[in-house]
Amino acid sequence: MTATLPPATRRPPRRRSGRRALLGAIAATAVAFALGLALGQSLDDNPDPTQTQTLVRTLTPLPLAPAARETVTITTTNP
């Protein structure tokens, strides 16, 4: 005795709309871009500690005090 089953009723598979796929791709690209920027900033903020850093500073001379304008006369007497 064999039982016959009615044919299974299937729905056709739902198709994703093109808009959703496009928005998903744009969102994934934006997230990847943001992660790339964050990684680049973190690598730039923490340079390699084995490298030496040279600072160049230019020193400007301080202003000089004005020269004395008094005349001093020294006289000596012979004993």
Image (spheres, helix red, strand yellow):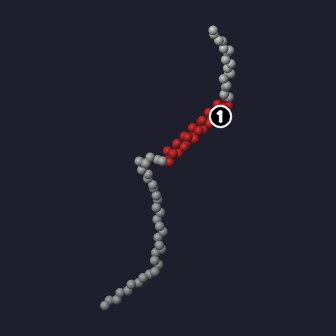
Q: Position of residue 75 (x, y in %)?
A: 38, 86
Compared across the picture, whether 47 is left or right of 37 comes to left
Compared across the picture, whether 52 is left or right of 29 comes to left
Q: Kindly identify which residue carries mark 1.
A: 23
- The residue positioned farthest toward the bottom in the image shown: 79
Give the total of numbered labels: 1
- The residue positioned farthest toward the front in the image shown: 1
Quadrant of the image occupied by residue 8? top right
Q: Where is residue 68 in the image (x, y as percent from the top left)?
A: 46, 77
Between residue 65 and residue 2, name the one nearer to us. 2
Q: Position of residue 24 (x, y in %)?
A: 63, 33
State the residue at coordinates (46%, 75%). 67
12 shown above or below 21: above
Amino acid under label 1? Leu
38 shown above or below 75: above
30 shown above or below 62: above
Q: Where is residue 46 in the image (x, y as percent from the top left)?
A: 48, 47
State the residue at coordinates (66%, 12%). 4
Between residue 13 and residue 79, name the one nearer to us. 13
State the residue at coordinates (41%, 84%). 73
State the residue at coordinates (46%, 58%). 57
Between residue 49 and residue 75, name the one nearer to us. 49
